[in-house]
Image (cartoon, rainbow, N blue to C red):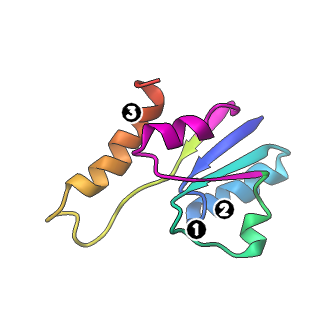
Amino acid sequence: MRVLVTGAFGWTAVSIAQALERAGHEITAFDLPSATCSDEIAGLFDQVFLGNVANFDDLHAATQAVDAIVHLAVAVGKDDYQDPETPFAVNVKGTYNRVVAQ
């Protein structure tokens, strides 16, 4: 199966990608252009897309050849109570872009 993992360079996503790799799946990473990872982590993925899940065009390009999506791209931080729009844009709008707006 071809699986897209959003938020791919985060700790939880890397753990899931390792499990998917052991199970024989092809894994595509999707994360922000500013996200960084080691060569070892990058080696888990068959393909890497850099973009923002809140951007329809970015997400649409990354999801064209996948069978499943593990959506782990989230915006969480101590300022979320003062700026709730930022996590909403990533956590809700990113999902909307793939599920509804296609």
Comes first in the chain, label 3 or label 2:
2
| Residue with the mark numbered 1 | 11
| Residue with the mark numbered 2 | 15
Q: 72 above or below 39?
A: above
Instruction: Assess whether mark 2 and mark 3 are in contact (beta carbons under 8 angstroms).
Output: no
Classify mark 2: helix, strand or loop: helix
Magenta extent: 47-69
Residue extending farthest to the front is 57
| Residue with the mark numbered 3 | 96
Mark-to-mark CA distance, 3 and 2: 25 Å
Number of marks: 3
Residue at image position (55%, 57%) is 31
Mark-to-mark CA distance, 2 and 1: 6 Å
Depth-wise, is mark 3 or mark 2 nearer the camera? 3
Depth-wise, is mark 1 or mark 3 nearer the camera? 3
Instruction: Assess whether mark 1 and mark 2 are in contact (beta carbons under 8 angstroms).
Output: yes
Residue at image position (41%, 56%) is 74
Classify mark 1: helix, strand or loop: helix
State which quadrant residue 43 falls in: bottom right
